[in-house]
């Protein structure tokens, strides 16, 4: 083991900008230094450093007892993480691609999510990994998994859109006593536009708090993940071409849902468009719409609309995937329709 | 025509019984008998409580299997300060739960869904937890518990703690993916744990030969690179001896091991399955009655002079009385308040109450 901190994990210390992926690596590394009970499990995270290199050089620094390469068995090692969490450890497991979380669905929903309620005590663990399309990954390397777990009381679900949020939210997730599913959009991992200089301190971003990306007065877009950036692009077009002022809310945490931020914004703009990369039926837009109906019906001046992926598996070919995924132009068109309503 | 296992089942055999005490003192040998008697008396009391309408959920007997849980648990280090070995028992392993310090009154509170139960009425029967005493209740898909115990015992190895874990499951759970993934993980990581497969020949109504092609579950061990041993599960001291042997090897750093308990479930899957003769040959049930673990051990104690008839009768009376008193005390205790359902889903937030239950129903309270 080497006690030297690898160069590539000191960019924030040096005041250099980092990508979202580097921000995630820094969060993991700093939490492992801060708290000896934090350890990692996952496939190929050791000598290889993870499929996306999130844990590059971690094995050398922390050793095999804290960076554990596992068999290909998401259920097995996620269940083992639950057992370790019972005994006071704080495991962070990496699902190589979140599409592969399905074998762990049983232990996550039946065991981990119910543990505290059943009197078996808290489950302070994080299940993290890459999600999302646009990388021509096809049906099994591109999915968003949030809604498979959104319906399960006892879980928290986090989905950051910036480097700064990713680092602060991951630290908060590791310190949270509840189980957290942490989704990292692989299209944002190394996106040059997302590189930013992070505060050189031990900041966290609290779970359950949305962020107002930009204020506006004509309509509200509620979104998260990669769609935050497409929504911002769309808002710029709407501002310059139509003179429409858009307010954008980045949820950041999906569970618990920051309902107040949504309701307050709707009461201000009176119109709501939900944009998510996940597929349409059973997407989070439905839950948001009913909550607004319950709590802000009389403030609405138009229908609640949504822009989402289509209800299909994620296709491989670029032309198909681009059609499948919501694009900036879709957001512009939906917002124009709503603004004119 | 129901598919029934034939009466020529090879497992219903009589094995040579040792007169060895396996190093146990006279008092310990009697404690073993007491644990067997508590198990049976508690379950018989449960049947009564269920008939009286006090048990809202299922009652699952382990008739004929009592020696498995008792013998195995007796071989582990049982402490109350969170430094001993860990047990994950099953619905048919109450004897192990009691030996690890699970209180009789809590057992009845759990079955009766009382607000005073360890899970405050959220969970049923033996599904409860005490990390100081060292037991973790199962979830119903039992294969999952192999994964959980793998992680608990992984923490022992990572921290260099001199502790081991033991997880019970049935022949049916051995078919699940979770069982495979958990065992493979444990074997690779040298997790200090013992898998206790209770081969009682039935997964609900499904006979073992429809769950697996192996004739003994020990044949699965080599596929994972772990050692396995099979033992007559009706012989409480043989179980104790086999598990103590396994525990010594696991504790010495060998990693994961498996012990198969061979016996026979003489009741239906649960009390709501009262006619097992529909899928089990009644002759087979009668044959296994002759291998009742309590009868066998009682006779052996008398034969070897480990206890007098008077001492055994006293144990039987005491355990019967303890169960009756605990059950009667639990009966009078309150059920949980309905609104308590919203707490503890998370450690740091409360789930909203239904808005229609407010004094003045208002959807904005949703």
Image: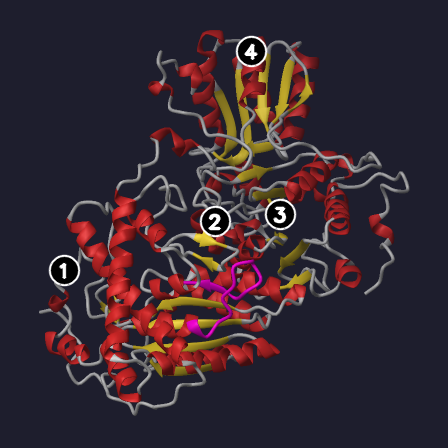
Whether B83 is among the magenta residues is yes
Whether B192 is among the magenta residues is no
Q: Secondary structure at mark 4?
A: helix
Residue at (50, 60) in percent of width and height: B134
Q: Magenta residues: mostly which secondary structure?
A: loop
Query: Which quadrant of the view contains residue B122?
Result: top left
Q: At which x and y percent is residue A123? A: 55, 47
- The answer to whether the residues at label 4 and label 1 have Cβ atoms under 8 Å apart is no
Q: Secondary structure at mark 3?
A: strand
Residue tagged 3: A130
3D distance between C-alphas at marks 3 and 1: 50 Å
3D distance between C-alphas at marks 2 and 1: 32 Å
Residue at (64, 35) in percent of width and height: A226
Q: At which x and y percent is residue B112? A: 28, 46
Observer-nearest of A56 and B280:
B280
- Dot 2 and dot 3 within a common chain: yes
> Which mark is nearer the camera, 4 or 2?
2
> Which mark is nearer the camera, 2 or 3?
2
Instruction: Report the chain holding disc 3.
Output: A
Q: Is residue B286 visible?
A: yes
């Amino acid at each position: 083991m080497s006690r030297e901190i690898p160069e590539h994990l000191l960019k924030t210390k040096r005041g250099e900008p980092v990508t979202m992926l580097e921000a995630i690596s820094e969060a993991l590394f700093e939490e492992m230094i801060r708290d000896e009970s934090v350890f990692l499990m996952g496939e190929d995270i050791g000598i290889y450093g993870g499929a996306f290199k999130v844990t590059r050089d971690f094995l050398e620094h922390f050793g095999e007892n804290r960076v554990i390469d596992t068999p290909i068995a998401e259920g097995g090692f996620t269940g083992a993480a639950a057992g370790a969490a019972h005994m006071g450890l704080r495991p962070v497991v990496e699902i190589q691609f979140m599409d592969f979380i399905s074998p762990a669905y049983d232990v996550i929903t039946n065991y981990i999510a119910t543990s505290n309620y059943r009197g078996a005590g808290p489950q302070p663990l994080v299940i993290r990994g890459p999600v999302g399309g646009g990388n021509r990954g096809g049906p099994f390397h591109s999915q968003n998994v949030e809604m498979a777990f959104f319906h399960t009381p006892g879980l928290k679900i986090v989905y950051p859109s910036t480097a700064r949020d990713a680092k602060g939210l991951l630290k908060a997730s590791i310190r949270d006593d509840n189980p957290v599913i942490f989704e990292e959009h692989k299209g944002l991992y190394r996106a040059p536009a997302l590189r930013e200089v992070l505060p050189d301190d031990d900041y966290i971003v609290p779970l359950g708090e949305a962020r107002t990306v930009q204020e506006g007065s004509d309509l509200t877009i509620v979104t998260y993940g990669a769609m935050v950036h497409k929504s911002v692009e769309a808002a710029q077009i709407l501002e310059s071409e139509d003179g429409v002022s858009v307010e954008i809310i980045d949820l950041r945490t999906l569970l618990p849902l920051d309902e107040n931020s949504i309701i307050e914004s709707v009461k201000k703009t009176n119109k709501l468009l939900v944009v998510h990369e996940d597929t349409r039926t059973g997407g989070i837009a439905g839950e948001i719409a009913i909550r607004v109906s319950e709590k802000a019906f009389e403030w609405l001046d138009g229908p609640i609309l949504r822009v989402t992926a289509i209800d299909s598996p994620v296709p491989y070919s670029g032309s198909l995937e681009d059609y499948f995924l919501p694009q900036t132009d879709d957001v512009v068109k939906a917002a124009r329709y709503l603004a004119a309503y | 025509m129901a598919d029934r296992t034939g009466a020529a089942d090879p497992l219903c055999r009589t094995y040579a019984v040792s007169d060895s005490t396996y190093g146990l003192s006279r008092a310990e040998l009697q404690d073993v008998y007491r644990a067997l008697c508590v198990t049976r008396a508690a379950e018989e009391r449960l049947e009564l409580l269920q008939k009286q309408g006090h048990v809202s959920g299922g009652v699952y007997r382990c008739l004929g299997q009592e020696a498995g849980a008792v013998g195995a648990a007796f071989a582990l280090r049982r402490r109350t300060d969170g430094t001993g070995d860990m047990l994950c028992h099953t619905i048919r392993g109450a004897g192990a739960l009691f030996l690890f310090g699970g209180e009789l009154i809590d057992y009845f509170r759990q079955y009766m869904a009382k607000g005073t139960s360890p899970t405050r009425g959220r969970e049923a029967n033996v599904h409860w937890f005490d990390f100081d005493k060292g037991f973790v209740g199962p979830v119903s898909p039992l294969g999952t518990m192999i994964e959980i115990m793998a992680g608990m015992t992984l923490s022992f190895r990572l921290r260099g703690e001199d502790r081991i874990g033991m997880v019970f499951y049935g022949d049916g759970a051995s078919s699940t993916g979770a069982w495979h993934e958990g065992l493979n993980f444990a074997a690779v990581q040298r997790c200090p744990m013992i898998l206790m497969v209770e081969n009682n020949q039935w997964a609900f109504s499904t006979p073992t030969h429809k769950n697996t092609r192996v004739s003994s579950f020990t044949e699965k061990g080599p596929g994972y690179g772990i050692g396995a041993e099979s033992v007559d599960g009706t012989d409480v001291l043989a179980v104790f001896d086999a598990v103590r042997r396994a525990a010594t090897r696991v504790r010495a750093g060998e990693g994961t091991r498996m012990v198969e308990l061979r016996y026979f479930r003489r009741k239906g899957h649960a009390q709501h399955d009262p006619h097992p003769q529909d899928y089990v040959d009644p002759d087979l049930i009668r044959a296994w009655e002759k291998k009742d673990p309590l009868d066998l051990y009682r006779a052996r104690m008398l034969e070897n002079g480990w206890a007098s008839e008077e001492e055994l009768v006293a144990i039987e009376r005491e355990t019967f009385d303890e169960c009756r008193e605990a059950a009667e005390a639990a009966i009078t205790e309150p059920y949980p308040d309905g609104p308590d359902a919203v707490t503890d889903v998370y450690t740091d937030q409360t789930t909203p109450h239904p808005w229609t239950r407010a004094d003045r129903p208002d959807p904005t309270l949703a």
